Image: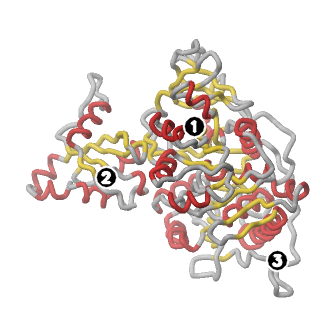
Amino acid sequence: MTAPIGWPTRDLVTHRVAATPQRTVLRDVETDTEWSVRDLDRRVERVACALEDRVLEGSGSGRGGPERIGFLMDTRPAFVTLFFAAMRIGTTVVPLNVRETTGELAAKTDRAAVSAVVCERETEAAAIELATETEGEGVDIVSVDEPERKGTRSLGPLEPSTVPGSDLESRSVEPRTLECDETHLLMFTSGTSGEPKGVRLTVGNLVASATASAFRLGLRPGDRWLCCLPMYHMGGLAPVVRSVLYGTTVVIQREFDAEATARVLDDGVTGVSLVPTMCKRLLDAGWEPADALRFVLLGGAPASEELLERCRRTDVPVYPTYGMTETASQIATATPAETEAHAGTVGQPLVGTDVSVVDETGATVEPGEPGELVVSGPTVTPGYLDDERTATAFGERGLHTGDIGYRDADGRLWVLNRRSDRIVTGGENVDPGEVVAALRDHPRIDDAAVVGLADEEWGERVAALVVPDPATTRRTGPDAERLLEPGSLLAHCDERLAGFKRPKTIGIADVLPRTASGTVDREAVRERLREDGTDVTDAA
């Protein structure tokens, strides 16, 4: 659980502007603009006023607003401003994955009791549709872009107005006194049960994670951390929190592109967070690191030895990391020297993070022996959205990760396999049960099994073995085969699953292979798909 700490007492921008207001804190690649801490503080103040006046007024929390606001936005400076504005007024942020379907988003906003969703122009249509699918009274939809359109309200104008008498020009917000154990962030992450887990992260968790990361990666006043990952994931949001805390610069690139990202990296960037697929694409594009680059934090999926060797040959300072949303990012991170001397390690735990390796009885095992990894320390979530899930996940030694691994005598960790049967594709978590449920919903499918197959591009690819319904097959005759073609199955999944969750390999079988106990033999399923599966193009 989170250990109490006495700082910060207010939002991070308020602390930072009091210390170094002149420092550059943000650079937006798309508009080629830079913001000082003073600039960011001014924007945060204005958005905090707008949130209170135009979004939170008259709705449910003790401060006159909803307890939780959803962000349906991709990586952009407005996300940063909104995040710290919500922290300033003490409102919990619920980042929503812009790649998910309306049904997936509606389920999360209902579970999180989100009262308002802030969107941008590109996600506005999805947000309006989302509002019609939520239970009860639904959610208010607010756009960061002007002008207001049917079904939305606008937070704008968010820049300081040149028009005298602007309703927000004379307003100010007294930064709320923060409690370090107060939930500021609620992030959803896929679980092995099929239902996404709502992870509560406190201000203390975020600060402890940023502090521990600085000890491992080092910190220099001139650091510039490139953020090109989605901010609705911890990997994209963490560099923002760290940079404001440190007083360094976060460089925002709104979308990863190998050639464009390589150019940005060559422009004075000292650090970047990537998933392995991104790193591989950069190397395939011929990228070589500039002298300024100090670290490439590689997470979201296991990094192959082949990729790490390519990084060594091209002098890429790669730091493979093992982490999870429940720990506000990193648990352990390996240095380049460690990856070369100890193949496969994810390094030693970060300062303040304790990792135990336990057997099925909960007893710790000796170095070199595999067991479940259990994590404790100030970065660890106080729990999930659901109390029952929290009680199940936490034990005497801390949070049970569900990951199997081992450690050596010096505390270096090796992770042998991911949580249960979870698939990690391109840095995105996919729960096989969710894909199986969507496939079983097809009127001509009787059963299905979903596994991950090794993939050079994505780390893993989602693969499905389906069993036709014998009754409907008899009725439809020759048409049954056409209706179960991969293209037809993908079309069926389009409205039920995000693009990264849809199968990229599909096979058809009379029955699913099973073990003696009757459970699906997942390795036999993989073998069948490797031999007889059809690879399909994911259009998402």
Q: Give the number of the mark in front: 1 or 3.
A: 1
Q: CA distance from mark 2 to mark 3?
A: 50 Å
Dividing the picture into quadrants, the one containing residue 150 is bottom right
SS for callout 1: strand
Q: Is residue 15 left or right of residue 509?
A: right
Residue at 87% across, 54% down? 15
Q: Give the number of the mark in front: 2 or 1.
A: 1
Q: Is residue 392 visible?
A: no
Residue topped by disc 2: 441
Front residue of 330/521: it is 330
Dividing the picture into quadrants, the one containing residue 167 is bottom right
Residue topped by disc 1: 320
Q: Is residue 529 left or right of residue 17?
A: left
Q: Give the number of the mark in front: 2 or 3.
A: 3
**Label pair 1/3, CB-CB below 8 angstroms:** no
Residue type at mark 2: give it.
Asp
Residue type at mark 1: give it.
Pro
Front residue of 232/249: it is 249
Residue topped by disc 3: 168
SS for callout 3: loop
Residue at 77% across, 43% down? 219
In terms of sequence position, does the residue under pointer 2 or pointer 1 come before the other? 1
In the rendered image, the quadrant that contains the C terminus is: bottom left
Residue at 71% across, 54% down? 224
Q: CA distance from mark 1 to mark 3?
A: 45 Å
